[in-house]
Amino acid sequence: QFQMIRHEELECLESLGQGSFTRVFLGRKKGLRDGEGYVTNVLLKVLDSNHKNCWESFFEAASLMSQISHKHLIHVYGISVHQSNNIMVQEFVKFGALDLYLKRGHSVSVSWKLEVAKQLACALIFLEEKNIVHGNICAKNLLLAREGDQTSGNSPFIKLSDPGISLVMLGQDVLMDRIPWVAPEVLEDPEHLELDVDKWSFGTTLWEIFSGGKVPLQGLDLHQKLQFYKKGHWLPRPDWTELADLICQCMNYQPELRPSCRTIIRQLNGLITSDYEILHAAGTSLN
Ligand SMILES: N#Cc1ccc(Nc2nc(N)cc(-n3cnc(CCO)c3)n2)cc1
């Protein structure tokens, strides 16, 4: 279900970061297109050699993303297995991970943030319709293909990355470290993932987008993170009431009470036309 890529076609360049049990590198992929040789930039996701036991899960994630295609899902070219290297080759997305983009202090408008949230919700609707649980929705896994800017007014464009190693394989410590992105019920039973887990993570990602890339619960150790869930706590509410309400609805400790993706889209559209957005839009164009 996906292409096997020969290691001779790949060139690994600088490291761009890391995920759970993986490292990501900028790479080049040589190929032939109607007889013409060409080279493209690619993203190489390499499974850590000390987690080789996760290779099935690693490639399952690659396989999932290569079997479905959607404009807001990352494109996976294929995999390359050579000596002890397990590599997923995916499209290189120009502006990288959204969490870093927001941390770098790019001042983005409220409508920019809402557009990104809407695109993520569209990707979730697509996955929900295929009854596919992603399991790792977060700003770090949202890649910015187009910046969009105030002047030309064209909007940003994001692509959701693959989920990586499945939650089942990650072990309790990694799951606890993923608080507050991982839904509370996952810590109880990581084997039975329902679609609702992605709605919880959507709420956390919404919080990230509107908090300028701040890391939620930064500085808390695993025990304190676990207590956060045990006590049914919520993240600090943004001052925009309707947004805060949507985040809290998504981050409902009772999975069945979380809104459907369609309801999420409807509420996002409501935010777009709300006075807060208009006021803020006016604010940015005034200064
Ligand atoms: N400066 C800079 C810069 C860095 C990276 C990219 N591009 C890109 N494309 C992808 N497909 C995936 C990622 N990526 C980055 N971190 C992760 C780990 C979390 O998934 C994945 N980055 C573009 C510009």
Image: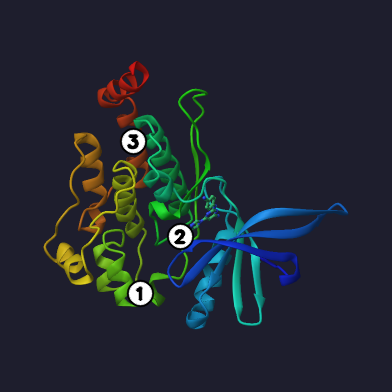
Vertical order, 209 against 3 (above or below):
above
Residue at mark 2: 132
Q: Earlier in the sequence, mark 2 or mark 1?
A: 2
Q: Amino acid at mark 2?
A: Ile
SS category of the residue bearing label 2: loop
Q: CA distance from mark 2 to mark 3?
A: 22 Å
- Marks 1 and 2: in contact by CB < 8 Å? no
User: In the picture, residue 120 is in which quadrant?
Assistant: top left
Q: Residue at x 42, y 35 (%)?
A: 115
Q: Is residue 1 visible?
A: no
Kindly identify which residue carries mark 3.
268
Q: Dot 1 corresponds to which residue?
A: 191
Gap between marks 2 and 1 measured at Cα? 14 Å
In the picture, measured across the screen, residue 22 lies left or right of residue 108, that is right
First-in-chain label (1 vs 3) = 1
* Residue 243 image point, x, y percent: 25, 38
Are circles 2 and 3 on residues that touch, CB within 8 Å?
A: no
Which kind of residue does numbered mark 3 sit on? Leu
Q: Amino acid at mark 1?
A: Glu
Badge 1 vs badge 3, beta-carbon distance below 8 Å: no
Q: Does residue 134 sit above or below 247 in this rendering?
A: below
* Some atom of ligand 1 lies within 8 Å of the CB belonging to the residue at label 2: no
Q: Under tag 1, what secondary structure?
A: loop
Q: Is residue 8 above or below residue 155?
A: below
